[in-house]
Image (tube, rainbow, N blue to C red):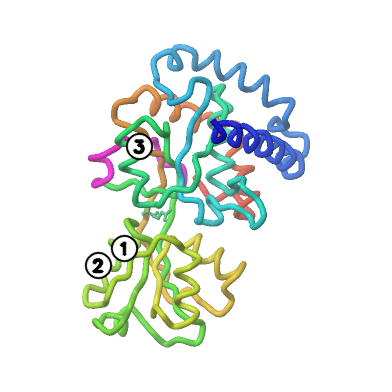
Amino acid sequence: MSVNINRRTFLTGTAAAAASFALAACGGSNTSSSAAGSSAGSASEAGSSAQASYKLVTPGKLTIAAELGFAPFEYIDEGSTDPVGFDVDLIKAVAQKMGLEAEYLPNQAFDTLVPLIKQGGKADVAIAGITITDDRKEEVDFTDPYLDSNQGLIVKADSAETQESLNDASKKVACQAGTTGEEWIKENIPDCTVVPLADVTASLEGVTTGLYDAFVIDLPVASNMISQSFKDLKVALEIPTGEQYGIIVSKDNPELTKALNEALAAVKEDGTQDEIETKWFGSVISQ
Ligand code: GLN
């Protein structure tokens, strides 16, 4: 019971923060809080047939699972409890198009997201910079891609380590457990000692202190973390993996995937996604 009360308080704060962000970032655009109601209304008209056929954990809400230590896509500012970031703004805009309220579950480890969505019952979707891969597609459905990404190899700023020099059992290369970064290390630095970890910030601290020789993570996160908080680290290698992010949905809920795809197309078409990209990346980066 207390969990429910907390979530409600949390949502009120999030909605208010989102509205003021929208106003600050987008001026007189249609994403202001007062326009939210009318746009949700028209979206639910457009999506009413789909809405009848998809399942939701909680009616009227899109319940979202994420690993919330992946800035600038999803993270929690110090002293706050509200997730913020590119994915957070995007999924809120998508939910709004569907006439739903976006509600985040507490932080989940990245490698639990696919099993959690597959199992069902806790969250309707997961969005967390999740790369669309064939292996994951066997477990869950993905929406259409919403953003392109690559990997980055991070080392200390004064380090001379390269992909070749790291390819030795004495070298510890860390990654977030269950990520495409982990896969890349296993395939491309096969002789190193791979260290899968849960938390990106703790991993970067480990590189700073010399506990790990390198860390592989999605390039936008690598660049963001280094410029914001880890100035003693650098991206030694940009790895053009050509990944694409998608939202994951249970295979038992294909109508939800369909409705999400329609809403994603709508936020792209009406310029909302461009505004969110500009807010978080300084310019429009998707095609
Ligand atoms: N894009 C990577 C993957 O899907 C990393 C995602 C993450 O750590 N949140 O594996």
Q: Which mark identifies residue 182?
A: 1
Circle 2 crowding by C-alpha within 10 Å: few under 14, some 14–19, many from 20: some
Circle 3 crowding by C-alpha within 10 Å: few under 14, some 14–19, many from 20: many
In the rendered image, residue 116, in percent from the top left (x then y), is placed at 35, 40
Residue type indicated by callout 3: Ile
- Say what secondary structure mark 2 lies in: helix
Indicate yes or no whether the magenta region holds residue 145: yes
In the displayed structure image, the side of residue 283 where residue 175 appears, left or right: left
Query: Residue 187's quadrant in the figure?
Result: bottom left
In the displayed structure image, the side of residue 223 where residue 242 appears, left or right: left
Q: Is residue 287 above or below residue 95?
A: below
At x 58%, y 33%, the residue is 93
Q: Nearer the viewer, mark 3 or mark 2?
A: 3
Circle 1 crowding by C-alpha within 10 Å: few under 14, some 14–19, many from 20: many
Q: Badges 2 and 1: C-beta atoms under 8 Å apart?
A: yes
Residue situated in front as seen by the camera: 19 or 205 = 205
**Residue of label 2:** 186
Q: Mark 3 or mark 1, which has the lower sequence index?
A: 3
Q: Which mark identifies residue 117?
A: 3
Residue type indicated by callout 1: Glu
At x 48%, y 48%, the residue is 107
- Say what secondary structure mark 1 lies in: helix
Q: Badges 3 and 1: C-beta atoms under 8 Å apart?
A: no
**Quick check: can you spot residue 113?**
yes
Q: Is residue 81 above or below residue 155?
A: above
In the rendered image, residue 220, in percent from the top left (x then y), is placed at 50, 60
Which segment is the magenta one?
Answer: 134-147
Q: Nearer the viewer, mark 3 or mark 1?
A: 3
Ligand 1 quadrant? bottom left
- Say what secondary structure mark 3 lies in: helix
**Quick check: can you spot residue 268?**
no
Q: Farthest front residue?
A: 1
